[in-house]
Image (cartoon, rainbow, N blue to C red):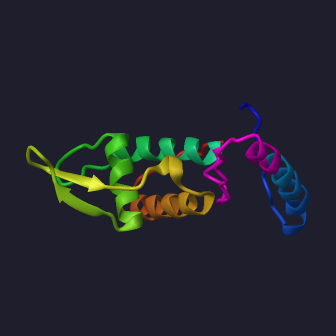
Amino acid sequence: MTEALKAHLYSPTQARQPFEQAWMLAKSLLMAGHRLTLEVRPEKRSDAQNRRLWAMLGEISQQVDWYGQKLTADEWKDVFSASLKRQKVVPGLDGGFVICGQRTSKMTKGEMSELQTLMEAFGAERGVTFSEVE
């Protein structure tokens, strides 16, 4: 089975045709014995948001000492995403701690905007200079 239907919707009036198409496709595939997955969800982060995220993380990692340590961009991503979502921290198997966190690749555009706003506020408190990312 290679048939799939994907639509990006921005207003309620746009939804009618894709939903009708989805129903026709789902009906025919189900009648043919296929099992299907239907997913309706908010749009995920954009490529531009992702580029800006990594630029900001890189700048923070270069300019901020965190309790006497330099953290990598990946480590800062964990710190910020855990802070945004108030994630749980549990002891690791061999010592240390593990953040049970949110993957930024799963964030919606709104969540990614919140994360970057948090990072901007953090950077402003610590004198981080952010460059413009297109």
Judge by depth and name the residue closer to the eye, 114 or 25. Answer: 25
Q: Is residue 43 magenta?
A: yes
Q: Which residues are magenta?
A: 26-46
Q: Is residue 45 magenta?
A: yes
State which quarter of the image contains the N terminus: top right
Tell which residue pokes out farthest to the top in this image. 2
Left or right: 32 as drawn, with respect to 94: right
> Would you say residue 126 is visible in this rendering?
no
> Would you say residue 129 is visible in this rendering?
yes
Residue in the image at 81% along x and 61% along y: 10
Position of residue 130 measured from the top left corner of the image (x, y, whole percent): 50, 49
Tell which residue pokes out farthest to the left in this image. 95
Residue in the image at 27% along x and 55% along y: 99
Position of residue 36 measured from the top left corner of the image (x, y, whole percent): 66, 47
Judge by depth and name the residue closer to the eye, 80 or 100. Answer: 100
Residue in the image at 76% along x and 40% along y: 32
Prevailing secondary structure of the magenta residues: loop
